[in-house]
Image: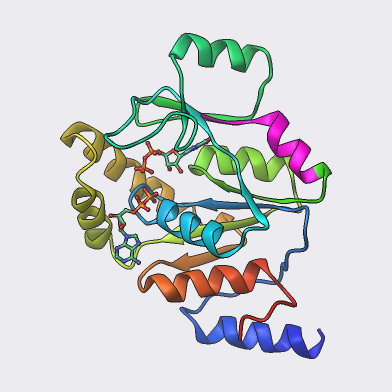
Amino acid sequence: MDSQGKRMMQVLSTKSGATTTKLLSPGKLIVLTGPSGVGKGTLMRLLLSRHPELNYSISATTRPPRPGEVDGKDYYFISRDKFQRLIEKGEFLEWAEFAGNLYGTSRKPVIDLMKSGKSVLLEIELEGARQIRATFPELLSIFILPPTFNELEKRIRGRKKDSEDAISRRLKRAKEEIDSASEFDLQIVNDDLETAIHDIEVAMFSGKELF
Ligand SMILES: Nc1nc2c(ncn2[C@@H]2O[C@H](COP(=O)(O)OP(=O)(O)O)[C@@H](O)[C@H]2O)c(=O)[nH]1
Ligand SMILES: Nc1ncnc2c1ncn2[C@@H]1O[C@H](COP(=O)(O)OP(=O)(O)O)[C@@H](O)[C@H]1O
């Protein structure tokens, strides 16, 4: 390992105990996964605003929009029928059912971006992340963990965006998801937001001025 690599591993070991051996170059795929309410969306928005070279793939979902969500920006909000047709046509790189709704990543935009050497960030749930990992073994996969389960529940409730039914489905699923964290390249605890962002940046961008 060169001196920069050593320095990076040192930084990783001093922050939230995270370790990784994979470092990313342009044209690569990064997946953020983890339970609902852990802060994946928050982390992703911050990463995109700080690193314009990163591209985000807007997912399709059958979930109805939450107040304030915009079609074509937050998600493509589509009917179950339309989603099924897109599955049959092979238009999704991955898709999964989560808490009673379907979610999927469109194949073409992601492949086109990667072919042109651009890096793509996906923020998806566990089953989809597994599918992507099987398709792209060179992927950098990051599992975001909550500091505690109570804090996770507090965040989901504090967001005030979901019905009680949607919240309990998410919390039930969260337990199973957290048990799978070790499948992924890196586990990062989203306790202090800036520390979590820093750990993700270190893993994603070798050779950049992050220190
Ligand atoms: N597999 C898959 N999961 C997705 C996709 N888009 C979003 N998700 C995940 O679906 C789950 C539910 O998302 P959402 O309804 O927006 O709820 P939230 O995560 O609780 O804010 C989250 O874990 C998202 O990361 C996708 O394209 N594919
Ligand atoms: N590090 C953090 N500390 C405290 N609250 C956070 C942190 N990260 C995210 N949050 C809050 O937790 C809630 C859930 O975050 P969100 O990004 O919507 O999660 P997810 O996309 O994983 O469902 C939001 O209200 C967000 O502001």
123 relative position to 27: left or right: left
Name the residue: 38% across, 56% down: 39
Color style of the picture: rainbow
Name the residue: 62% across, 80% down: 210
Ligand 1 is in which quadrant of the figure?
A: top left
174 relative position to 73: left or right: left
Q: Which residues are magenta?
A: 103-114
171 relative position to 21: left or right: left
Q: Where, by quadrant of the figure, is residue 195 drawn?
A: bottom left
Q: Position of residue 125 (x, y in %)?
A: 48, 42
**Nearest to the observer: residue 42 or residue 96:** 42
| Residue 105 is a magenta residue | yes
Q: Position of residue 2 (x, y in %)?
A: 82, 86
Q: Where, by quadrant of the figure, is residue 184 drawn?
A: bottom right
| Residue 120 is a magenta residue | no
The quadrant the N terminus occupies is: bottom right
- Up the image or down, 128 lies above or below 48; here it is above
- Up the image or down, 49 lies above or below 166; here it is below
Name the residue: 65% across, 66% down: 204
Q: Position of residue 200 (x, y in %)?
A: 56, 68
